[in-house]
Amino acid sequence: MDLQTLTYLVVGATFVLYVGIAFASKASSTGEFYVAGKHVHPVANGMATAADWMSAASFISMAGLIAFLGYDGSVYLMGWTGGYVLLALLLAPYLRKFGKFTVPEFIGDRYVSQAARVVAVVCLILISFTYVAGQMRGVGIVFSRFLSVDITTGLVIGMAIVFFYAVLGGMKGITYTQVAQYCVLIFAYTVPAVFISLQVTGVALPQLAMGSELSDGSGSLLARLDQIVTELGFAAYTSGTKSRVDVFFITLALMIGTAGLPHVIVRFFTVPRVRDARSSAGYALLFIAILYTTAPAVGALARMNLTQTIQTGPVGVAESNLPYGERPDWFKTWETTGLLRFEDKNGDGRIQYYDDANPAFAPRAASFGWRGNELEVDRDIMVLATPEIAGLPDWVIALVAAGGIAAALSTAAGLLLVISAAISHDLLKGVFARSISERQELMAGRASAAVAVLLAGYLGYDPPGFVAQVVALAFGLAAASLFPAILLGIFSMRVNKYGAIAGMVTGLLFTIGYIIAFKGVVMEPWLPNTAEHWWFGISPEGIGALAAGLNVAVALVVSHLTPAPPDEVRALVERIRTPA
């Protein structure tokens, strides 16, 4: 059976499974649509949270970032993992004790303000749409490669599938679909990693392969990788190029951004009791760790396999560069997607892949007759392409396709649900049309999800960066807006609605302005996106941490200049802080 047919069968079988689960767990009430009726077992919630959390960015893009950034890519591992711990310890149990449906509902009740609730909805929608753009981009990439369609067609297929089970099943359907998606994605991620690890180092566990000797006896994996990439003018794989300040702020932004992501927070509303929220957080961390401890090895092995495939011998020897006419099948397949591009700049018919932005390497490259890097590799394809580069069996490649699709769909569905809940529950039922029936609210939620899918599809078609960077910006927005409002809402009696609103608006506008200035969203960037132009040396990916501090400072100052919150707020804060 050829790869195409096998992929259709494996991916099709997973779709049948997801659709079957969606039908079996159709939501019939607002409680089931928003929080799955609060009957989800902690283990199932842990698996669903892990799938919700491990998006296209984790499955598709993170190892690709690590592969190309090396040590610098570790900020994503540290930030996302640390943020989850922060969420589990600081917010999840208290928000579950609050006992309602959404994050804006908590903010509205805590600060006794409909205006604060509306501002939280605006923040939530901006965060979720920024995040879902990355997921839809991932969906388009996976479909275009493995179903042999262009990215636009792939996006449309992905939108249709997400629309189906998000609209039909709500949180109840999404929860049990995500349990299945977790099983698919973790199997799909770890199996090829084990194969490649055995192939390169002879060690079955990828986590141990990172520090192991290569099977050919040429030294340790990381030392050999450092040698290979530096000979081509790239920075050493195990050394970083980011400043310490930027690494600190990016990691912090990812951590507190994680703790402020509404689609992750809402998962802790679905379990029966507060202690179940804590235990499901523990299970989720365990399930997440399986992938996150595997990703560094996948990145390193992917970079080594790719580089050695193109540069087959000593640097500077013409015969060591792969002739374009002899490129392997995987190369040709990815070329058709536009995510792998070759330009023969010196007309020798061979592929030169090196760092042509390194001025120190330029004279050496010129002496070889090279006229610039000729290979452009989209980082998002590395996880998907690595099994093919390594020559693994077709069933492994088909499995990776199913895993990538599962990761992107699971997070996209969770995001679309929080967007629809914010519109139907917080804006319509909570503010503008309080008299609507439960049935009308349910219909409004499904209609909101439909509109959100269309907008997400457009953003996925034209995102402001590749997948993980787009996602990183969403974390910055969450860090700057919702996280401080939730944290102060739980741990401060003094912060009032004026302070919370002023803080959220300040953090959000500051972050958006900074991102537009350096990265451009809809419009062209105003300033060069380089370290010498950044404020205090902080890149757009890390600015959310600074904005969060600004949010807290503004909230505290404004609150102390305005009347204290009423007594019922003190009672609410004391109630959610009490263990149960």
Image: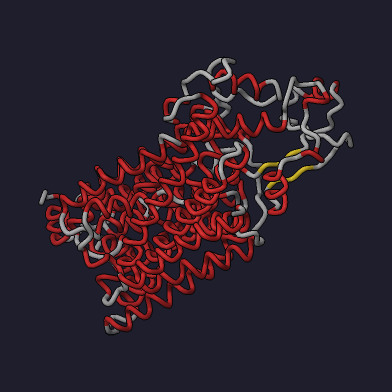
How is this picture coloured? secondary structure
Q: At which x and y percent is residue 259?
A: 34, 47
In the rendered image of this protein, does residue 420 appear above or below residue 9?
A: below
Residue 514 visible to the viewer? no
Q: Relative to 80, is 556 on the left or the right?
A: left
In the rendered image of this protein, does residue 336 appear above or below residue 249?
A: below
Number of numbered markers: 0
Q: At which x and y percent is residue 493?
A: 19, 51
Observer-nearest of 303 and 216: 216
Q: Relative to 112, is 555 on the left or the right?
A: right
Q: Dividing the picture into quarters, in which one does residue 523 lie?
A: bottom right
Residue 363 visible to the viewer? yes
**Residue at left offset 24%, top offset 60%:** 270
In the rendered image of this protein, does residue 21 appear above or below residue 541?
A: below
Q: At which x and y percent is residue 442?
A: 33, 78
The N terminus lies in which quarter of the figure? bottom right
Observer-nearest of 449 and 299: 299
Residue most toward the right? 347
Q: Dividing the picture into quarters, in which one does residue 99 lie?
A: bottom left
Q: At which x and y percent is residue 276?
A: 18, 52
**Residue at left offset 43%, top offset 49%:** 185
Observer-nearest of 216 and 475: 216
**Residue at left offset 30%, top offset 47%:** 556
Observer-nearest of 174 and 77: 174
